[in-house]
Image (spheres, grey):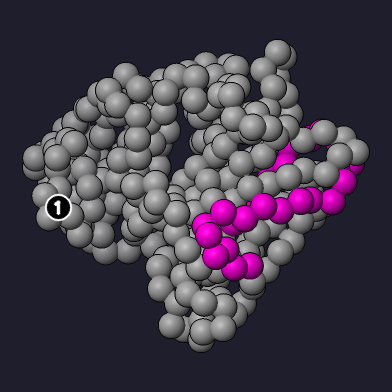
Amino acid sequence: MKTIIAGSVFAVFALMVFAPSAFADHANVDVSIAVGSSAPGCETTNECFVPSEVTIDVGSEVTWSNDDTSAHTVTSGTIKDETPGEAFDSSLFMAGKTFSYKFEEAGVFPYFCIVHPWMSGTVIVQEHDEEGLDDGMEHEEGYATAMSADGSVMVKIGAAAPTVGDELAIEVEFTDADGNAIEHVNFDVSATQDGTEVLSETGQHSHSGVTEFTTAALESDSPVDVQVTILGFGLPTDDPETWTGPKGETVSAQVVPEFGPIAMMILAVAIVSIVAVTARSKVIPKL
């Protein structure tokens, strides 16, 4: 329950800060290094860095404030990298101090604290017109993306704008941090509109890393909430206990109606929450 509440708080924050460029570009973002993050435990709810994932535009700046009582670092990469800190590295900075970095290139930038490696976060840097605008892709789809807590999986959820009376096509894609397709992903997917479930598919298996789903006919053009829960990597005929990769991580996105002249957009509410889900439970919590 604590995790679900935390995920809901992040979702509300994302709604306020990460709206599509129909309203405003992603501005500079502040991230807090939480009190108590120097002790293990905050990683279970993604509350070591708050928020643990932020989305900005190229040229925007992220400022980390050390609100803990211990010294920390903000170092690009993951604990598994041979040479972490290639993109940015704060070095050790004390309680009450800040570290800022301006991102000049688009991409996904995982980071962590070298002193306390269970602390991790992600910065997603987008081109100014990348989110919610017509990029010339077939079907003019919009996308919301999020990375797993360990930085190994990027989940992309794509859809057009919801239209009353029409079914909604939803594309789910799994890639690694370098953009390569991940094969044999087991997952659950669901979607709700106005509190009504319009899609529920459990125990799904994606051989190629890309799978498409279609909802029931929508009763309104209200936003549609989509959730994808990763169950693990492996053949569906194998024992789920032998599946690898992150398990029980839920990515949430909200597909919103059209705004003025801009067609087909997704409100960026792409977040990752660690939830109490196993490959056998097939339960997807509602945020």
Residue 158 on image: x %, y %: 61, 41
Residue 52: give x, y in percent of width and height: 37, 45
Residue 287 appears at what percent x and percent y?
62, 52
User: Which quadrant does the N terminus fall into?
Assistant: bottom right
Q: Nearer the viewer, residue 145 or 46?
A: 145
Q: Is residue 241 left or right of residue 89?
A: right
The stretch in magenta equals: 204-228
Horizontally, residue 231 falls left or right of residue 88, namely right
Residue drawn at (35%, 22%) of the image = 58
Mark yes or no: residue 89 visible.
yes
Instruction: In this rendered view, identify the residue nearer to me: 99 or 227.
Output: 227
Residue shown at 70% from the left, 13% from the top = 261
Q: Up-down: is 183 above or below 203? A: above
Q: Amino acid at mark 1?
A: Ile
- Inspect the magenta stretch and tell me whether residue 77 lies in it: no
Crowding around mark 1 (Cα neighbors within 10 Å: few <14, some 14 to 19, many 20+) is many
Pick the residue in front: 225 or 158: 158
Q: Position of residue 81 (x, y in %)?
A: 18, 55
Residue 236, by quadrant, is bottom right
**Nearest to the observer: residue 121 or residue 21:** 21
Vertical relation: 240 (above or below) 69: below
Read off the residue under disc 1: 114
Local SS, label 1:
loop
Residue found at the far left of this picture: 92
Q: Residue furthest bottom?
A: 239
Give me the residue at 53% from left, 46% from top.
156
The reply to whether the magenta stretch includes residue 224 is yes
Up/down of 268 relative to 43, above or below? above
